Structure formats: C-alpha cells, structure tokens
Amino acid sequence: MRIDVLPDADAVALRAARWVAAAARDAVTARGLFTFAVSGGRTPWQMLKALTAEEVPWEAFHLFQVDERMAPAGDPDRNLTHIRESLLSAVALPPGHLHAMPVEEEDLAVAAARYAREIATVAASPPVLDVVHLGLGPDGHTASLVPGDPVLEIADADVALAGPYQGRRRMTLTYPVLDRARAVLWVITGSEKAPVLPRLLVGDRSIPAGRVRADRALLLADRDAAAGLPRQS
C-alpha cells in the first residue's frame, strides 16, 4: 500500500479527485468505460464536489455505491443523498450510469442479489471494478463491514446485508468484490482515525479494514489521521 500524507482534509479531497479523474481517463482509454464505487463521509463528498471541476469522461463513467443505509429517499443518512448534492447537482451522468443501492425494496436480500448482478452486467463476471473508494472508522470498520458482523465472513456474494450499526441496517459490498478491484483508494481524515490507521497499514486482520487487499491500494491521509505514524524523512 502506498500512502501520501497531506496537510488537511481539503488537500486530501482535492488530491483524491485528481487521482480519480486520471484513473477514469486511463480506464476509458484502455477499456472504454470507468467503474467507480464510492463510500460515504464528509471528505468523500468534498472529493466528489472537486471531481466536477476535473477533466472526466462522464459519458463513460459508471458510479456505484460501496454501502448504503436503510433509510427513505432523500434522508440525510443516505449516502445517495450526498452523492446527488455533491456530484450529480453539477454533473449529468448518462441514463443508467448511476447505480444506486436498492435499499428501499421490501425484500432486501433479493435486492442485494440484484445489485450484485447489476455490477456484473457493467463490470464483467465476476465483476472487476476499476476503483473502489474506502474510508476507515475509529473502530476499524470500512464500507459497512463492521467488527463482529457475520457479513465479514461472506465469501460467495459480492453484495450483502449487514446488521444494525449506529441505528441503521446497511447494504454493503463484500470482501470478494473489494479485493478484485483494480485499485482501492483509501481517503482517511481526522484525528479520531489516528489510533487505528497504523493497524490498517500493517494489515491487522482483527479490524475489518485490515482484511482488504492492500497491494493495489493508495491511501491518502491528512496530518491529523496520520499523527500516529512514524515521521517520514
């Protein structure tokens, strides 16, 4: 895993946006489309807003969700609400290129399986996403892969349902599809992440984030999140 430490969250968001834009251009040149799965969080919303100012081949851009809370449409708890506000208010993706997790369905297990098929329709079978964006929780969770949840052990499905966490059930991508991604982009900011970031970097499998494949990963952190790391010379 490669790590870049930047001064603050704004710098991380801008650097991430520029990196995603370059990855999108490269993917479209190589394969004709770009598949990007995004997680939630304040800095990622800044990243998406900054992405609107970059040179991006939007006509070939497919946007997926890494995870989503079970909440009504437009609810501030929904990651999709913030995706619409930060990115889609300024950029019009082609019809069918926004792939929102179907968390409002009555049968959520069926909905999760259908979302997995939707990913495969765009990104081959088994699907290989170009870039998966991940964050890191103070408890070591990433996506909606949280400590102690049975979803951590799922190896035969790319999308699954996690149990209640911080008041909401979640739909989430699982380790198999995360680990097939061509690249993983970690965006980690805030001093509350400082105690757990070193554990991610050493691949500590006792935290969910430490179980994600690391050899194709770029980690962007601000100085607050990186405060517990050895100083770089």
Image: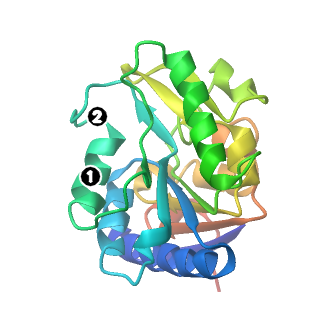
Provide the residue designation for mark 2: 77
Using the image, determine if residue 145 lies above or below residue 167.
Answer: below
Q: Position of residue 30 (x, y in %)?
A: 68, 79
User: Where, quadrant-wise, is the N terminus in this rendering?
Assistant: bottom right
Say which mark, if any, is on residue 200.
none
State which quadrant residue 185 falls in. bottom right
Residue shown at the point (53%, 64%) measured from the top left: 226
Position of 127 with respect to 42 (left or right) is right
Q: Helix or strand or loop: what does disc 2 sit on?
A: loop
Distance from Cα at disc 1 to Cα at disc 2: 13 Å
Position of 153 with respect to 50 (left or right) is right
Amino acid type of disc 1?
Arg
Of the pair 114 and 37, the residue shown nearer to us = 114
Q: Is residue 140 visible?
A: no
Amino acid type of disc 2?
Asp
Residue shown at the point (26%, 25%) measured from the top left: 72
Residue shown at the point (46%, 55%) measured from the top left: 63
Q: Is residue 66 visible?
A: yes
Q: Position of residue 119 (x, y in %)?
A: 60, 45
User: Where, quadrant-wise, is the C terminus in this rendering?
Assistant: bottom right
Q: Helix or strand or loop: what does disc 1 sit on?
A: helix
Outermost residue on the front side: it is 95
Q: Earlier in the sequence, mark 1 or mark 2?
A: 2
Dot 2: within a 10 Å radius of its alpha carbon, few (fewer than 14), some, or many (20 or more) residues? some
Provide the residue designation for mark 1: 84
Using the image, determine if residue 138 lies above or below residue 69.
Answer: below
